[in-house]
Image (cartoon, rainbow, N blue to C red):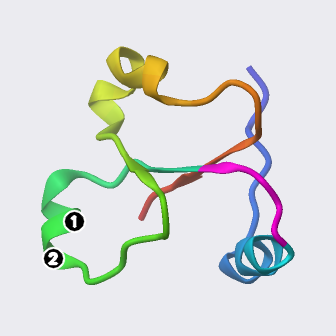
């Protein structure tokens, strides 16, 4: 499988500011969520190890951006 394309935080912000319609999936682990004050607007929080069972929550009609640390 080919690597997924990567974008920088700056590129993501630029695309968000331009009104691009995409879904952000926050796949940080729950401990990282608790230790961080960062929450991307309208992001869907899904632990990476639970991604497959949460696939129905992810819209298929638009691009997806995964956020991890």
- Determine whether 6 is above or below 46 in the image: below
Quadrant position of residue 28: bottom left
Query: What range is drawn magenta here?
Result: 19-23
Which is more toward the observer, 54 or 5? 54
Residue that badge 1 annotates: 32
Figure disc tally: 2
- How far across and how far down the image is residue 48, in percent? 35, 37
Residue 35 on image: x %, y % = 15, 76
Check the picture and name the quadrant holding the N terminus: top right
Residue at disc 2, secondary structure: helix
Residue 40's place in the image compared with 67, above or below, is below
Q: Is residue 20 magenta?
A: yes
Place residue 37 in its image quadrant. bottom left
Which element type, helix, strand or loop, lies under badge 1?
Answer: helix
What crowding class fits label 1: few (fewer than 14 Cα within 10 Å), some (14-19), or many (20 or more)? few
Where residue 9 appears, as percent x and y from the top left, is 66, 77
Q: Is residue 13 left or right of residue 11?
A: left
Determine whether 15 is above or below 51 in the image. below
| Residue at left offset 33%, top offset 16% | 53
Task: Kindly identify the residue that appears in the image at 74 percent across and 40 percent down.
Answer: 4
The label shown at residue 54 is none
Residue carrying label 2: 35
Report whether 2 appears left or right of 32: right
The reply to whether discs 2 and 1 touch (Cβ–Cβ < 8 Å) is yes
């Amino acid at each position: 499988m080919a690597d997924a394309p990567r974008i920088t935080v700056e590129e993501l912000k630029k695309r968000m500011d331009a009104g691009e319609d995409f879904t952000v999936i926050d796949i940080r682990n729950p401990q990282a969520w608790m230790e961080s004050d960062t929450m991307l607007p309208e992001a869907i929080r899904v632990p990476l190890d639970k991604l497959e069972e949460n696939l129905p929550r992810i819209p298929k009609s638009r691009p997806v951006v995964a956020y991890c640390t």
